[in-house]
Amino acid sequence: QVEVVESGGGLVQPGGSLKLSCAAGPRDFDASVMAWYRQTPGNERELVAQMFSDGRIDYADFVKGRFTIARGNGKNTASLQMSRLKPDDTAVYYCTFDVGNGPLALRLWGQGTWVNVSS
């Protein structure tokens, strides 16, 4: 059994920074993709950033130059460094790990962590 747990959310002022972390465990596995999504009430989840096992990284246009996805120190850990935050970044942020590749990959989701950008 694998559980994904996010941490680091909270209240931050516009222009500020926040770092989210997540870890998947305890069962060991090889993640093909690690990613962060976000969702606001009434809207669908949207991809924020993803990192592939070969090192490729993709960012959504609305976070390019402001957010950085990275692997953590341990296997199947990840972080999302968020800078120059805007009120529009307010959302629940979810961390995911894909097990396997392509359309048959299993995507593991965390419970989410709330980020509130407000003065």
Image: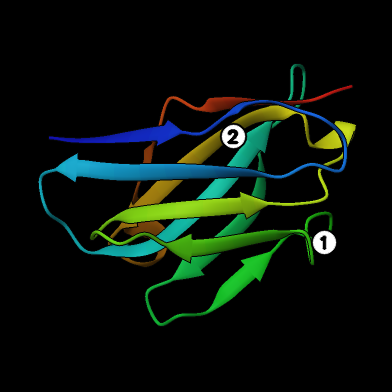
Mark 2, residue position: 93
- The residue sitting at 61% across, 53% down in the picture is 81
Residue at mark 1: 61
In this image, 73 relative to 46: left or right? left
* Mark 2 Cα shell of 10 Å, populated few (<14), some (14-19), many (≥20): many
Badge 1 crowding class, 10 Å Cα cut-off, few under 14, some 14 to 19, many 20 or more, is few
For mark 1, give the secondary structure: loop
Q: Can residue 23 be seen in this view?
A: yes
Residue 105 on image: x %, y %: 33, 56
Which quadrant of the figure contains the C terminus? top right
State whether residue 45 appears in this view: no
Name the kind of residue labelled 1 in the image: Asp
Marked residue nearer the N-terminal end (1 or 2)? 1
- Where is residue 71? Give x, y as percent: 40, 64
Q: Which residue lies furthest to the top in this view?
A: 41
Residue drawn at 77 percent across, 29 percent down: 90
Which label number is shown at residue 4? none
Say what amino acid the circle numbered 2 marks.
Tyr
Q: In this view, does 63 lie above or below 3?
A: below
Q: Residue at x 79, y 67 (%)?
A: 65
